[in-house]
């Protein structure tokens, strides 16, 4: 519970949300599904106001030439069920959203934006998947110019904002892997954009938990592109509970340009590249386990993604021929 | 803030604080079907539909529902017109304690709304966020499938026998006064024997419609909310405690610490007086002995104020050295948990031994010396949590006669009254304990955890007070099923004959030893007798450590003893190169043999303090008159396709990533015999020919009330739904020692039967007078008493005549039963498992269970109990474990970190109930506690079959499996070089 919550705001405009969030005198945070804000063990007693993002029209999944766009208020369940995401990248994101919260109750509430904002504390497989698809996150904040808002905004004179100084709005994009480091506290996550893969791609998602509905002790996601039987690009990430998803560039580089069918080579690359992988230890699993299991899952994910990619490469080059 | 909510189609305008949770608002408004189970969105008990989508209302502000439609189970269907899902949940036996039921129903409803023909997998996924600890989920899945079929307009065969709708049948007063010998005109309704039939649970309708059936489902004006301050140290002295600021906080009405109440040694374990074992607890003490131990308690206007007040209490702790491992606790110089002279009943306080039980027969050492093979093994079981979905909760208040009412979710109302009396100084006559339905107990609700403090707060404030544990409190400050270290040593002949068996048990009793004696007895009593041999040695010590106190978990440690023994039997078979079933068959208990241990167990209770060395041989021996082991094992062997599957397993196909294996384990359950077990029942006739049954055994979801109704109905020739059972209330329901649920159930069954028999006798004698025939010539069946000459009277006419006619008299009886215990239950269980050798993760494919459980009163309920036991057994076998850091802080304090089985984890089950030859209808035995014990060893045996590697420590986590495989490969490599 948010024991010191004094204000609850519904807004229909992103700008209004940004105005409320930038008030210096009353700590205001965005409220998406609320599953974390209200469900975490140690409540944040400093929060005095929330802005409900529900009516901002940010729950959407759409596609254009640049790829897929997913609004930050899209729930994990919508992502898991959306036909568009079930086919895009072999269903990688839909599957990851489904895995992210094994409880459909949570999936119906928890949002993409909340998950991204939380980063590692979200314990989400989705983040590991986002790490391999090179997602871009669109953020908005009020930063540039200063406007005195005593008495409200011109469009919304009713908004009680006495004493607030609003610094105008700004939109920017961040590659997903820089999000948790670079996002500023008042920045609102608007959407995620993912470019479509090239020809001959394949994806795979592997995970292990203590039970069928456990948070992942470890998740491996792979996106592989194959051309003429060789790895054109390899993207591999490992993540899991209490971990920021981690890309494994050594493995990726070692494989790129190599023949796909050489499994010994794959095993060697995984072995060699896993020295980069320093997973945490916690009561669920030791670091040693995560390393051994990480190697196994990475191998499996790459093998599967490469098989799919190779098959797709062959069929598409047949199509071209 | 004002908020308009559309709840179940009705628009409500509510005054809501910005931070109020939807769950709390709904309950405050009387939607009691929305339950509080975990606070974090992990359990699904609080599920509601928001615009048709199921969401947890505990992690949602009420404001978030503005403008949305909210649906609770109250809006699904009423008792007059149930929704098909509510119907099929009852029909399929999917409702046990009923605490999870509203949430399950809503999740299922939402699924069927968008997918009228879901696959089994889709159903399991839709229910994956709704945890249930009582069922094994499969019946719930079945209920959803059946409802889907009904909604699609298909016909389905009923599973259980519906009630006949007597609640809506008009009451025909008939002609009055009745002339002697006059015949009644009403056609009687056909009633057959009530026993052995899949009757529907008599209390299911209120549960599927979300009626306020549980302790917390009420609201009292002026209610104060209590919260508990617990120790952050595993062991410390409270040097000073200052509550000035907390008391000064507006809205705070009382703060209690050890300074405010007398220091009385007691045990919180709800056991018959005089409780066996240590009296080593103090309601609030100046020493704290585990992280989570009680320090202070606050009552305030709201839960938030109470929580705030806790932060204002200043405690100056002097940390003391702490010990968490029982082996270290036994060592000289280890920190001593109970040096205080006031505590009594401790076996050896200097060595931290709370209880010690020992048994020996034959010459064990000589037998070992003469054995051709000795097999030894050490088995480790973790500390686990019972995880009833309903948390501990009590509400206390003064009634209009200035008596203290304690409304509690307890399984032992009379013990609560006795203990609250002792701790508050009120005489029992000033205390009334009401124990409505219990939302799952599994042993944890036999301890007094909240009632005493809640009562003391009502005494201090003169206001109604509610003290409810949060889920984190349950993990931190409740009772746990203790960790065990069990060492087995067996001496054998090469042909597989066991010559001597020795079991040494170390139970981690935690900080208080309330259940130390039963726990020391339980693991041996329910395992070693499976394989009697000339020389037997059993020794168990329950040892204090600075961890939460040990309690029961669906038996007193039987599951621990059986995990060790049944794993060990497979190891013996491997060492002998024999089939595991052959070794068992060669050595197992047979009819006519003497049950070892029984005298010892009795003695442990008789000498409430088992200080003295016991002389078990002087006590009566019990010979086994019936044993269904062989039959059970045969069934499991066939259904599991043992021979074929074993050939494929054995870790032979080592190269494959996925390995399969099968394993079998046997189990027995013998309720611990107590000398002071007493149950009573009162039955009285109503004017319309129905009956009230008053008993003091709360219904916790095991179906006991339905069984009682069936038994009374059978004797009285009526249907079970015409037996109305009153929830336990120490003011009106008769005395019961309700301790071990199993033995109490057994005793209560007999009390009910006797009360019914006496009422029947009274009915017949009134009828005999009215019909002018001898009572012996009359029969009573189908609501009608018939005389040989063809005259008859229906029950309602008889009731009117008896109560208002000539020589009026009430028809009622109270009977009691005090017995040793029921006959043992036997079981065999088989598990087929698939192991992923890359991750160590496991997938249980199938469980086969055969139970020799005496006369089965209700097969649907019985199978439900067994399925539930399988679910719990697999759950702790695979994923349950309470973990602490080095300071004794629990790391698993929610249902995300501590995993229990969900609908998606549960495998296919096949359950066979053996009734034996012409089972004696009085041979009613416990079946609720046996199924939990065999699943884990069968699982471990299956894993050994799949991988060729034995895991001796539970749970079988992916890491343990992978580690064991790694070690085995290393050893194999070393052996090869
Ligand atoms: C029982 C349970 C189990 C869970 N298990 C998992 C799991 O295994 N994996 C998983 O992924 N999730 C899990 N979750 C969900 C988890 O709480 C979050 O990961 C969830 O995704 C947060 O989403 P939300 O919409 O509910 O966020 P909220 O709780 O509303 O917000 C979370 C944080 O993000 C901020 N925020 C929200 N939206 C935005 C935005 N658009 N821009 C900027 N900041 C924003 C909020 O201010 C807040 O600080 C679980 C939740 C529960 C209750
Ligand atoms: S999910 Fe809300 S109480 Fe458990
Ligand atoms: S019936 Fe599901 S928790 Fe009790």
Image (cartoon, rainbow, N blue to C red):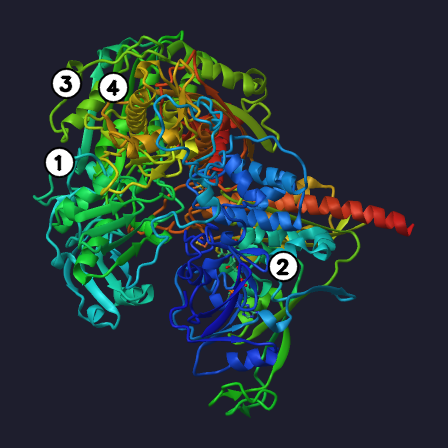
| Residue placed under numbered mark 1 in the picture | B345
Q: Find residue B40 and name its label.
A: none
Q: Chain of mark 2?
A: A
Residue B140 visible at all: yes
CA gap between label 2 and label 1 equals 61 Å
CA gap between label 1 and label 4 equals 22 Å
Secondary element at image label 3: loop
- Mark nearest the camera among 2 and 1 is 1
CA gap between label 2 and label 4 equals 61 Å
- Up-down relation of residue B836 to residue A253 (above or below): above
CA gap between label 3 and label 2 equals 69 Å
The answer to whether A65 appears left or right of B238 in the picture is right
CA gap between label 3 and label 1 equals 19 Å
Q: Does the residue tagged 3 have its C-beta within 8 Å of any atom of ligand 3?
A: no
* Cβ atoms under marks 4 and 3 closer than 8 Å: no
Q: Please report whichever mark, 3 or 1, sits nearer to the chain's N-terminal start.
A: 1
* Cβ atoms under marks 2 and 4 closer than 8 Å: no
Secondary element at image label 1: loop
Image coordinates of residue A310 in percent, x first then y, are: 77, 46
| Residue placed under numbered mark 2 in the picture | A130
| Residue placed under numbered mark 3 in the picture | B615
Secondary element at image label 4: loop
Q: Nearer the viewer, residue B48 or B628?
A: B48
Q: Please report whichever mark, 4 or 3, sits nearer to the chain's N-terminal start.
A: 4
The answer to whether B145 appears left or right of B871 in the picture is right
Is the residue marked by circle 1 packed among few (<14), some (14-19), or many (20+) residues within 10 Å? many
Q: Quadrant of the N terminus of chain B?
A: bottom left
Image coordinates of residue A300 in percent, x first then y, are: 64, 43
Mark 1 on the same chain as mark 4: yes
Is the residue marked by circle 2 packed among few (<14), some (14-19), or many (20+) residues within 10 Å? many
Image coordinates of residue B445 in percent, x first then y, are: 30, 42
Mark 3 on the same chain as mark 1: yes
């Amino acid at each position: 519970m948010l024991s010191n919550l004094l204000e609850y705001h519904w807004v229909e405009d992103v700008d209004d949300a940004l105005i409320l969030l930038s008030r210096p005198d009353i700590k205001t945070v965005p409220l998406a599904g609320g599953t974390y804000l209200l469900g975490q063990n140690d409540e944040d007693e400093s929060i005095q106001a929330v802005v409900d993002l529900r009516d901002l029209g940010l729950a959407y999944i759409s596609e254009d030439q640049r790829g897929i766009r997913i609004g930050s208020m899209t729930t994990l369940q919508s992502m898991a069920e959306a036909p568009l995401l079930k086919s895009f990248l072999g269903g990688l994101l839909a599957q990851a959203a489904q895995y992210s919260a094994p409880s459909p109750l949570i999936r119906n509430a928890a949002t993409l934006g909340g998950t991204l904002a939380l980063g590692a504390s979200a314990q989400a497989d989705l983040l590991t998947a986002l790490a391999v698809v090179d997602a871009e996150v669109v953020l908005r904040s009020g930063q540039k110019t200063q406007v005195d808002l005593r008495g409200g905004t011109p469009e919304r004179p009713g908004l009680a904002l006495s004493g607030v100084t609003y610094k105008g709005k700004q939109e920017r994009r961040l590659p997903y892997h820089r999000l948790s480091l670079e996002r500023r506290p008042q920045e609102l996550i608007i959407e995620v954009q993912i470019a479509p893969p090239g020809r001959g791609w394949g994806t795979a998602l592997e995970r292990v938990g203590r039970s069928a509905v456990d948070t992942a002790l470890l998740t491996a996601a792979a996106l592989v592109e194959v051309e003429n039987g060789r790895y054109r690009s390899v993207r591999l990430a490992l993540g899991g509970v209490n971990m920021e998803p981690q890309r494994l560039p050594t493995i990726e580089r070692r494989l790129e340009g190599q023949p796909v069918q050489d499994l010994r080579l794959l095993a060697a690359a995984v072995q060699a590249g896993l020295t980069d992988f320093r997973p945490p230890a916690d009561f669920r699993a030791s670091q040693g386990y995560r390393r051994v299991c990480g190697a196994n899952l990475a191998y499996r994910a790459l093998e599967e993604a490469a098989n799919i990619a190779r098959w797709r490469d062959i069929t598409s080059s047949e199509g071209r021929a | 803030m004002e908020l308009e909510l559309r709840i179940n189609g009705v628009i409500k305008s509510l005054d809501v604080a910005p931070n109020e949770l939807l769950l709390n608002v709904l309950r405050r408004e009387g939607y009691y079907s929305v339950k509080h189970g975990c606070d974090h969105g992990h359990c699904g008990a609080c599920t509601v539909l928001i615009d048709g989508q199921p969401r947890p209302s505990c992690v949602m502000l009420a404001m978030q529902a503005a403008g949305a439609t909210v649906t609770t189970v109250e809006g699904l269907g009423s008792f007059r017109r149930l929704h098909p899902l509510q119907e099929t949940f009852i029909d399929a036996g999917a409702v046990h304690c009923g605490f999870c039921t509203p949430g399950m129903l809503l999740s299922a409803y939402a699924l069927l709304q968008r997918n009228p023909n879901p696959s089994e997998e889709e159903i399991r996924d839709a229910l994956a966020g709704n945890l249930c600890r009582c069922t094994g989920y499969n019946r719930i899945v079945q209920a959803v499938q059946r409802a889907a079929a009904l909604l699609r307009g298909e016909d389905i065969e009923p599973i259980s026998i519906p009630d006949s709708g007597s609640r809506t049948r008009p009451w025909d007063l008939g002609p009055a006064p009745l002339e002697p010998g006059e015949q009644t005109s009403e056609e009687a309704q056909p009633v057959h024997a009530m026993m052995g039939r899949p009757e529907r649970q008599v209390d299911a309708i209120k549960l599927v419609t979300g009626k306020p059936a549980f302790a917390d489902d009420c609201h009292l004006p002026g209610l104060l909310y209590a919260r508990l301050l617990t120790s952050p140290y595993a062991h410390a002295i409270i040097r000073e405690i200052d509550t000035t600021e907390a008391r000064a906080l507006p809205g705070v009405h009382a703060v209690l610490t050890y300074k405010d109440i007398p220091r009385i040694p007691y045990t919180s374990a709800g056991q018959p007086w005089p409780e066996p074992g240590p009296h080593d607890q103090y309601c609030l003490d100046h020493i704290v002995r585990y992280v989570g131990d009680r320090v202070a308690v606050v009552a305030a206007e709201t839960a938030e104020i109470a929580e705030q007040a806790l932060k204002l209490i200043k405690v100056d702790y002097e940390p003391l050295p702490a010990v968490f491992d029982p082996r270290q606790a036994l060592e000289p110089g280890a920190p001593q948990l109970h040096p205080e002279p006031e505590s009594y009943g401790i076996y050896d306080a200097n060595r931290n031994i709370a209880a010690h039980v020992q048994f020996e027969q034959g010459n064990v050492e000589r037998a070992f010396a003469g054995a051709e093979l000795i097999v030894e093994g050490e088995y480790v079981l973790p500390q686990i949590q019972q995880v009833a979905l309903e948390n501990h909760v009590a509400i206390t208040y003064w009634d209009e006669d200035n008596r203290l009412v304690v409304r509690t979710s307890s399984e032992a109302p009379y013990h609560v009254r006795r203990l609250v009396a002792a701790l508050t100084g009120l005489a029992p006559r000033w205390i009334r304990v009401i124990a409505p339905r219990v939302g799952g107990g599994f042993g944890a609700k036999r301890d007094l955890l909240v009632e005493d403090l809640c009562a003391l707060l009502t005494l201090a404030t003169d206001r109604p007070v509610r003290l409810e544990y949060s889920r984190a409190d349950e993990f931190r400050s409740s009772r746990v099923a203790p960790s065990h270290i069990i060492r087995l040593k067996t001496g054998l002949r090469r042909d597989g004959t066991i010559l001597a068996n020795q079991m040494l048990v170390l139970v981690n009793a935690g900080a208080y030893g309330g259940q130390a004696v039963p726990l020391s007895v339980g693991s041996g009593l329910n395992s070693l007798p499976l394989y009697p041999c000339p020389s037997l040695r059993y020794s168990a010590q329950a040892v204090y450590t600075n961890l939460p106190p040990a309690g029961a978990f669906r038996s007193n440690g039987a599951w621990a003893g059986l995990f060790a023994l049944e794993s060990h039997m497979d190891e013996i078979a491997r060492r002998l190169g024999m089939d595991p079933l052959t070794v068992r068959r060669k050595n197992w208990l047979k009819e006519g043999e003497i049950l070892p241990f029984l005298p010892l167990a009795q003695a442990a209770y008789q000498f409430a303090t088992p200080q003295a060395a016991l002389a078990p041989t002087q006590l009566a021996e019990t010979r086994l008159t019936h044993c269904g082991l062989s039959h059970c094992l045969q069934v499991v062997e066939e259904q599991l396709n043992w021979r074929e599957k074993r050939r494929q397993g054995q870790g032979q196909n080592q190269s494959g990533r996925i390995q399969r294996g099968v394993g079998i384990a046997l189990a027995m359950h013998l309720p611990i015999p107590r000398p002071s077990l007493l149950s009573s029942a009162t039955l009285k006739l109503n004017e319309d020919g129905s009956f009230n049954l008053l008993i003091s055994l709360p219904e916790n979801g095991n179906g006991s009330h339905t069984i009682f109704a069936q038994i009374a109905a059978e004797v009285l020739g009526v249907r079970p739904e015409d037996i109305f059972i009153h929830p336990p209330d120490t003011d009106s329901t008769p005395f019961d020692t309700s301790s071990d649920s199993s033995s109490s159930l057994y005793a209560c069954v007999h009390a009910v039967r006797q009360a019914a028999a006496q009422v029947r006798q009274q009915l017949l004698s009134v009828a005999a007078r009215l019909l002018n025939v001898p009572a012996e010539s009359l029969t009573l069946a189908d609501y009608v008493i018939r005389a040989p000459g063809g005259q008859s009277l229906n029950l309602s006419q008889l009731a009117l005549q008896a109560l208002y006619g000539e020589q009026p008299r009430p028809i009622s009886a109270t009977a009691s039963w005090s017995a040793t215990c029921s006959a043992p239950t036997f079981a065999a269980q088989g598990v087929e498992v698939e192991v992923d050798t890359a991750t160590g993760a496991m997938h249980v494919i199938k469980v086969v269970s055969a139970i020799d459980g005496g006369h089965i009163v209700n097969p649907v309920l019985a199978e439900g109990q067994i399925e539930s036991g399988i679910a719990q057994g697999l759950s702790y076998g695979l994923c349950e474990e309470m973990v602490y850091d080095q300071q004794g802080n629990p790391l698993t304090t929610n249902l995300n970190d501590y995993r229990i089985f969900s609908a998606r984890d549960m495998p296919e089950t096949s359950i066979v109930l053996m009734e034996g030859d012409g089972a004696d209808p009085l041979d009613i035995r416990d079946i609720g506690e046996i199924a939990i014990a065999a699943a884990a060893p069968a699982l471990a045996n299956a894993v050994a079959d799949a991988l060729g590697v034995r895991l001796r420590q539970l749970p079988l986590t992916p890491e343990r499996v992978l580690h064991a495989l790694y070690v085995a490969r290393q050893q194999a490599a070393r052996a090869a070089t």
